[in-house]
Image (cartoon, grey):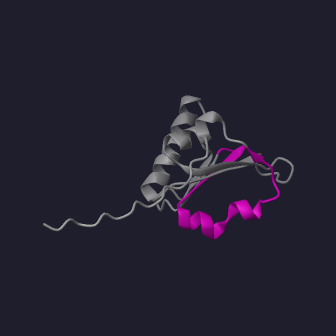
């Protein structure tokens, strides 16, 4: 899942191991898309990878709004946020004591893109 998210340029992907603290899932995958269309593209890529493996999500929430898309894969719950929504809900803070699972090479952490400086308009 982290690899599929990385293919769509997801920012700050993390995976939390919840096996010792939660009964409803084994872990969370959390990542950020810059805006609604990107969160939907990230979710679509994850769902496509699942379909290719013969699996599917048992529940999907928030896809139309795109600010917080939740993909319930039973063993893992994927959260795809816009930057503002991820900051507001702070799942990493709520589950801060849980171990983090290091991303594989295909899903290296991608830092948020820095805004490009505006170019001054040339005067003739």
State the image coordinates of residue 73 (x, y, percent, origin top left).
65, 44
Residue 54 in the image: above or below residue 64: above
Total number of numbered discs in the rendering: 0
Relative placement, left or right, of 120 versus 92 is left
The region drawn magenta spans 73-101
Please say if 108 is above or below 81.
Answer: above
Can residue 40 be seen in the rendering of this structure? yes
Q: Is residue 98 magenta?
A: yes
Residue at 77% from the left image edge and 59% from the top image edge: 95
Residue 60 position within the rendered picture, expressed as x and y whole percent measured from the top left:
57, 52
Residue 47 colored magenta? no
Residue toward you, 74 or 7: 7
Q: Residue at x 56, y 48 (%)?
A: 110
In the picture provided, is 19 more to the left or to the right than 9? right
Rendering quarter of residue 83: bottom right
For image coordinates 54% across by 42% down, the residue present is 6
């Amino acid at each position: 899942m982290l690899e599929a998210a990385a293919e769509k340029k997801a920012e700050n992907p993390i995976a939390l191991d919840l096996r010792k603290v939660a009964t409803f899932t084994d872990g969370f995958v959390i990542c950020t898309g810059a805006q609604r269309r990107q969160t939907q593209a990230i979710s679509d890529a994850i769902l496509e990878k699942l379909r290719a493996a013969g699996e599917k999500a048992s529940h999907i929430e928030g896809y139309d709004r795109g600010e917080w898309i939740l993909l319930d894969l039973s063993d893992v719950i994927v959260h795809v946020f816009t930057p503002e929504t991820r900051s507001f809900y702070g799942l990493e803070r709520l589950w801060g004591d849980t171990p983090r699972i290091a991303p594989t090479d295909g899903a290296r952490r991608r830092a948020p893109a820095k805004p490009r400086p505006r170019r001054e308009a040339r005067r003739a």
